[in-house]
Amino acid sequence: MINANNIETALENIGSDTKLTQADYNKPFNEIGLDSLDVFNLFSELELVTGKVVSDDDFQTINTLQDIIDYLNK
Amino acid sequence: MPDKFSWRFYRPGDEELINQLYRSVTGRSRTLKQYTWQWLSAPAGIGDIALIHGQDDLGKTKLIGHHGVMPLRFTNRDNDLLFGKVENTMVLSSYRDKILYPRFEKRFKQVYENRYHGLFATMGPESAIRVRHATGYKFPVNWVNFKLATSPLAQIQYPWKIFLNQLGNGKNTNGLMNDRFSKEVIEKRMRMSNFLSSVEAEKTSFFDRFWDQARLNHGIAPRRDKADLSWRFWRNPYKEHYTFVVDDSHQKCGYAIVSINPEMSFQAFLEDYAVINPSQANYDELFKSLIVALDKAGVTCLNVLSTTDEVLDGTNAVFKKYQFILLRIWCRLDKVRERPGMPRFITESGISCGLSDRNWFVTGIVLEGRA
């Protein structure tokens, strides 16, 4: 199961210094200071941790950190 | 607004829309002839051109992104190689925060990388460099620039000409306050200084067997068969190139190709060079002759782009020797400034050939080739 701690660890591993609050999990990536490359790196990191690969179609429906948690826990 | 994105590779007929996207993103116009030359006519074949389309709620699609790889022939002594140069990575600005572009590039790379022994890029904006990092490229060497003075007098003439050019900028003072001359005038000057025009260079027999001999003394290097040089330089639709051949004896045999900016004809750009036997003495001989010829043609400064690859230490030493004195002092003081790295990636087939991402014979030939 993926949770907020995994997300924060993954963000640290990709070198992001974004400090998250609970509300940030439901905000679009760009509103919490993550650009497309940060998001790409975050997915790559989480795909490694979970062994799950996010399909191209599903990828386009994921817009927030909460979406990532919900998707990977499906 | 499109909210769904898809991609596919190039199909004949896409050229016009790609050029429109190119103009929207870069602000530069590109003709069909220029596009065809760059992407469809190289001796190594057609480029890998990936297009990203956005689709809106009504099902209407629009080209919003492009990523290309130009296939370039390389050699490693007697082995033929195919390298790919990443070029024209672009996304319409209004979509940059709507699509996760790096994800697309990763997909494209998975499809095309099997075709190549190695991939590389030259320079680009910070965002492009970050994408290369994220998609597995290494940055083993850095780019270095040199400005070579063609004579002792050029040490003074060059800054003066730059000053006059700034003063005369935008004014109709052709040849007086600036060094703006017609192509015909420049060509005449260059030919009188022993440079070959593109037509003459294509006809000379010097290049018929040059690379067949030289490649045996070179590791990883762009291939310089006549077909490669013709495409890249002599049939380049963007600008004229002038070829200088040194053919005194077998060992000193070599060439250099330069271009001149017609707006500032006192400056030349070193586009490519090679000698049969790449030793510092032979490079010294080639550049000594080249610099004398450029001086005779009224050129005061030769701009050179090189890398910190160890195999280029010999040529870089020669470039340093001819560098403007003030620039040499400045370079010593300016140690802190970080030079951009050159992104390189050796593919599985490159690894199986024992290729390394270091020690490439890089010259300006690897640049895009436009004006």
Image (tube, rainbow, N blue to C red):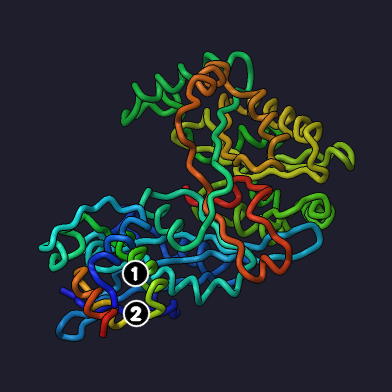
Find out whether the residues at labels 1 and 2 contact each other: C-beta distance under 8 Å. Answer: yes
Q: Chain of mark 2?
A: A
Q: Quadrant of the N terminus of chain B?
A: bottom left
Left or right: B344, with A58 as reference point: right
Given residues A19 and B37, the one toward you in this image is: A19
The answer to whether residue A25 is seen in the rendering is yes
**Disc number at residue A54?**
2
Residue under circle 1? A43
Q: Chain of mark 1?
A: A
Q: Secondary structure at mark 1?
A: helix
Q: CA distance from mark 1 to mark 2?
A: 8 Å
Q: Is residue B286 above or below residue B257?
A: above
Left or right: B59, with B44 as reference point: left
Given residues B16 and A37, the one toward you in this image is: A37
Given residues B187 and B154, the one toward you in this image is: B154
**Amino acid type assigned to the residue bearing label 2 in the image:** Val
Q: Residue drawn 58% across and 31% down?
A: B302
Q: Indicate the position of residue B23 as horizontal and vertical percent values.
A: 32, 58
Q: Residue drawn 40% across and 24% down?
A: B165
Mark 1 or mark 2: whose residue is earlier in sequence: 1
Q: Is residue B267 above or below residue B164?
A: below
**Disc number at residue B297?**
none
Q: Residue drawn 40% across and 61% down?
A: B89
Left or right: B80, with B332 as reference point: right
Q: Residues within 10 Å of mark 2 (few under 14, many from 20)?
A: some
Given residues B263 and B306, the one toward you in this image is: B306
**Amino acid type assigned to the residue bearing label 1 in the image:** Phe
